[in-house]
Image (cartoon, rainbow, N blue to C red):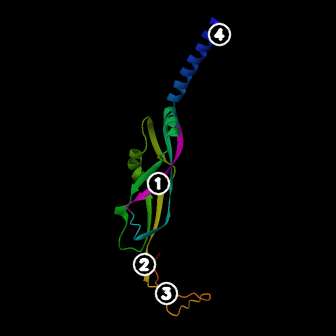
């Protein structure tokens, strides 16, 4: 009985030592992040197409992969407000990811990370100016027919009194 306890304790100690040494090795992990472009005036511009996923190859130890597997917030925000020309109706932006790698690194958990490399080279944004037109509904020549002994009291009203249509 005493020998079996010593054997089990030795196995557990060997497993812990193996786990720590294997988690300390540098490995490359591919992770996908949801990307959000901040600074777009959604009332003025319709977003026709954007790249919504950013894939990164992250070189780190195994502890990073374990920590990232638990963490669920995998999103990156990039401000593009200074890149939008307010005079254009249709805007197509191609962002070089390498120019934004420092911003990206600040937003991910970089404890134990030795290298961050984007999988692609660009991120695309396609915007179009929204066109707005107001319509006032017209209810002329509307006939209301009811069953016997029923009628309409007052004048019909349509609410809302104005309808706005947006499009690009």
The mark found on residue 132 in the picture is: 2
Q: Which residue has dot 3 on it?
A: 153
Lower position in the chain sequence, tag 2 or tag 1: 1
- Residue shown at the point (44%, 85%) measured from the top left: 136
Marks 3, 1: nearer the viewer: 3
Q: Which residues are magenta?
A: 28-39
Distance, label 1 to label 4, CA atoms, is 54 Å
Residues packed near mark 3 inside 10 Å, few (<14), some (14 to 19) or many (20 plus): few
At x 40% / y 52%, what residue is drawn? 100
* Tag 1 near tag 4, CB within 8 Å: no
- At which x and y percent is residue 114? 44, 37
Above or below for 7 versus 147: above
Q: Are marks 2 and 4 in contact (CB under 8 Å)?
A: no
Q: Which residue is mark 4?
A: 4
Q: CA distance from mark 2 to mark 4?
A: 80 Å
Q: Is residue 65 left or right of residue 100?
A: right
Q: The residue tagged with tag 4: helix, strand or loop?
A: helix
Residues at marks 3 and 1 touching, judged by CB atoms closer than 8 Å? no
Pointer 1: residues within 10 angstroms few (<14), some, or many (20+)? some
**Which of the labelled discs sits on residue 35, or is there none?**
1
Question: In front: 74, or 121?
Answer: 74
Q: Decide which of tag 1 and tag 4 comes sooner along the chain.
A: 4
Q: Secondary structure at mark 2?
A: strand
The vertical placement of 46 against 32, above or below, is: below
Alpha carbon distance from label 2 to label 1: 28 Å
Instruction: Looking at this view, name the residue that lies furthest to the front.
Output: 149
Taking depth in this image into account, of 120 and 147 the one nearest to the observer is 147
Closer mark to the observer between disc 2 and disc 1: 2
Examine the rendered structure and indicate whether residue 31 appears above or below residue 84: above
Query: Residue 94 in magenta?
Result: no
Query: Residue 19: where, in percent of width, then height?
Result: 55, 25
């Amino acid at each position: 009985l005493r020998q079996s306890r010593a054997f089990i304790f030795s196995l557990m100690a060997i497993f812990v030592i193996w786990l720590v040494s294997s988690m300390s090795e540098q490995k490359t992990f591919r992770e996908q992040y949801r990307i959000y472009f901040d600074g777009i005036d959604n009332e003025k511009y319709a977003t026709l197409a954007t790249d919504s996923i950013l894939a990164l190859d992250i070189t780190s130890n195994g502890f990073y992969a374990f920590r990232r597997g638990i963490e669920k917030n995998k999103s990156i925000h990039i401000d593009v407000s200074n890149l939008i020309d307010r005079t254009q109706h249709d805007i197509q932006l191609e962002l070089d990811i390498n120019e934004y790698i420092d911003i990206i690194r600040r937003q991910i958990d970089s404890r134990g990370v030795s290298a961050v490399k984007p999988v692609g080279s660009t991120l695309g944004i396609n915007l179009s100016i929204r066109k707005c037109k107001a319509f006032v509904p017209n209810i002329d020549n509307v006939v209301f027919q009811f069953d016997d002994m029923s009628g309409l009291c007052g004048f019909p009203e349509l609410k809302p009194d104005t309808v706005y249509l947006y499009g690009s």
